[in-house]
Image (cartoon, helix red, strand yellow):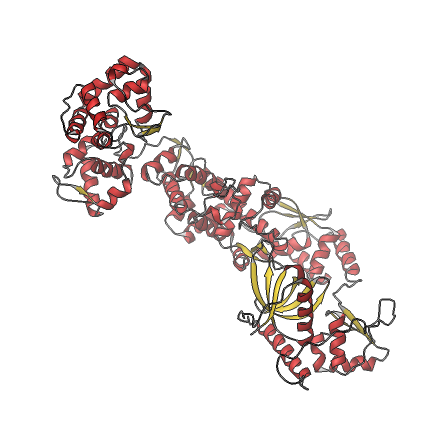
Amino acid sequence: LDRAHLAVVEALALLSEPVGGCDVARIVHASPATVIAVLERLRSLALVWGDDADLRLVRAARDVLGSTPAGLGPALVALLTSTSPARVKALADDVGLEAGGDPVATAARIAAAYADPAWAQARIDDAAAAAGDDALRLLERLRPGPASGRLGRVPADVRLATAETVLEHLLARGLLVAVDDQTVTLPREVGLHLRGGRTTTTPVDHPPALSTRPVQAPVVDRIGAGAAFEAVRRIELALETWGTGPPAVLRSGGVGVRDVRAVAAELDVAVDEAGFLLEVAMAARLLAAGDDAELDQAWLPTAEFDHWREQPLELRWSWLAAAWLNSHRATVLVGERDDRDRPVNPLSPDLERGNAAAVRRATLEVLAGVDPGAAIDDPEQPVTVVAWQRPRRVVLRDALVRRTLREAGWLGVAATGAVTAAARVLLAADAGEAARVLAPLLPQPVDHVLLQADLTAVAPGPLVPKVGHGLALLADVESRGGATVFRFSRDSVRRALDAGWPASEVHAFLQAHSRTPVPQPLTYLVDDAARRHGRLRVGNAGVYVRSDEPAELDTLLADAALAPLQLRRLAPTVALSELPADVVLARLRRAHRAPLLEAADGRTVDVTQDSRRARPPRGGGGPSNDAAGLDLGRALAAVGAMRAGERARAARPAGEAVQGPARLLDELRSAAEEGRTVWLAYLDQTGTVSERVVDPLGVDGGRLTAYDHRSAGTRSFSLHRISRVSATS
């Protein structure tokens, strides 16, 4: 309900039922025609029923308004009947009314007297004459509402003859009533009189008028298009950066201030704007919390980001703008304290507010209500208009309106106090048409650059995605603006080579997308980087297996039972495995080989001192003769699951879980040797425990290497974060 409708509802709640339409019009600060129209709509909403002479407000609406509609205090008769009979009699005597034997009847006579504006004004004038202007100032403080106030010590028994202070003079005349020993209330009759007999001091027929100034609509659209282009570019750059170096998710669910500052520095914007852009990315489902390489929660671009970045620029903007318009995130709360006195960070779940989207849309509709070619002259005017439209939704309302005006400028929805043409279409719920309106104002993507002899490339406009992504691999951005300058270096070219581009493909890319001949220094740079690239090779090697007889290694590599060792040949007499040495040694011996363990200097290592003891059998009887075949089956099942990308369902522990570092390590190594699947409890960096089902492959260097059924891939787990391990059921 807007302010006019609320004023009529409040008037109905203030008046004693049944209420006549004329009585409502008398105390509502609006024209009779407005009151009649509002009453008709309230009837259609089933908030009011009855004819014009017998209007009644539904009980639910009365309950919502509470005991102080329109900020006016309780009725005087209700206040007096809650005090002592002696106090009612004393007040009647002091104001010159008859005090009968019935205190309720006396209270009713006093209330009826104060309902007369002349009587109430006479008592106010009398108090001002006795106590001065301070009496009027105290009444004025309580007039707008709330009608109650704490004033320290409030005297209990006050008589007109002995009144000395301002408070005592007002209490003795019934202009204020003591609620307790510290609180006083302005009676409803007195408050209504101080407001001129109306529930509000200003008219409520129409929203506050807007003052405007002339602007050129094409200029507004061009400024908005520039901001839209920058918003899209900055969000893409921020998410690309987080894709390679994702920041951690805080325990509270947000992102750290240091990470936001780093984004702000990279984007060359204020921290406040950087946080807003990240919020828009999350609202557009381009950014979400996920697992990083360490299985810790981190902020990562989503799969939809890859689809979004391939779209034309105008569609990328409309995607972002529509998500922002409908988002329930209140970024104005960033930096505030939560209910546990902790600062609220960007991307935190504490930013969710149910009224954020409605207030945001209402604010933009105020701007859109002004004709094209005009702009709001005062940024506070939308605040007052939205307050008139939504008078009861006061929580964060004004702050959300002011914040929306700032965010609209950052996103290119508004500029210089006016919405753009694309934003007007967006408000009509047509994001596709909004993109078409914006498209002619955006710089057109180009598919070429201008290569310079100083190892730079100048892009005369935004690059099409294919060329932009390729150039981002080959060169580093040196400056941005109307044109983007890229610089080639040995490191940047090596980045493309690391990504799998051969030198011939680099040369072909440069020739295909340069409007100028490829400079000779750049050709030399690419060839030199390619010549040096890959001279040294680095890879993971948990253990080596060597033999003086190449044929011995041939049989190992051909043995299907040893496939889980993942052996790969490095030289005729050397093979490598990424599994720990104790696992490889045990598997080779189980395959009836006779390996020796040797140290780095070639000495044979005696392993008898570290010999292990077998666990007692889980069931009766000794070990099966086909244990190796069973182990191979488990390994092949794990490989099959990996190739199929199938996720295993979470399994509960079959028995008591193993705890303690030594026992955990022993259980995991045993599971790796025996090819068993285990359940484990894993703590991420926020202390959250996740349950996982894994196939251990090896334990080495403080980490467990295992096939993770949840992610359908081989992962590395920090041993110190594994709290419990158990065999699966």
Which residue lies at the image location 75% right of the left edge and 72% below the top edge?
582
Compared to residue 717, the image places residue 110 above or below, namely: above
Where is residue 112? Give x, y as percent: 16, 27
Where is residue 543? Give x, y as percent: 77, 69
Name the residue nearer the viewer: 512 or 706: 706
Which residue lies at the image location 73% right of the left edge and 69% below the top edge?
578
Where is residue 632? Give x, y as percent: 66, 80
Say left or right for 372 vs 519: left
Where is residue 181? Give x, y as percent: 34, 28
Compared to residue 469, the image places residue 36 above or below, namely: above
Residue farthest along the bottom direction in this orientation: 625
Compared to residue 629, the image places residue 11 above or below, namely: above
Say left or right for 12 vs 323: left
Q: Is residue 14 visible?
A: yes
Name the residue nearer the viewer: 522 or 137: 137
Which residue lies at the image location 36% right of the left edge and 25% below the top edge?
151
Count how many numbered circles sit on residues in the image. Answer: 0
Q: Quadrant of the C terminus?
A: bottom right
Q: Quadrant of the N terminus?
A: top left
Which residue lies at the image location 75% right of the left edge and 67% below the top edge?
542
Name the residue nearer the viewer: 198 or 269: 198
Quadrant assignment, res 18: top left
Q: Is residue 225 visible?
A: no
Say left or right for 246 vs 317: right
Compared to residue 254, the image places residue 405 above or below, namely: above
Quadrant assignment, res 714: bottom right
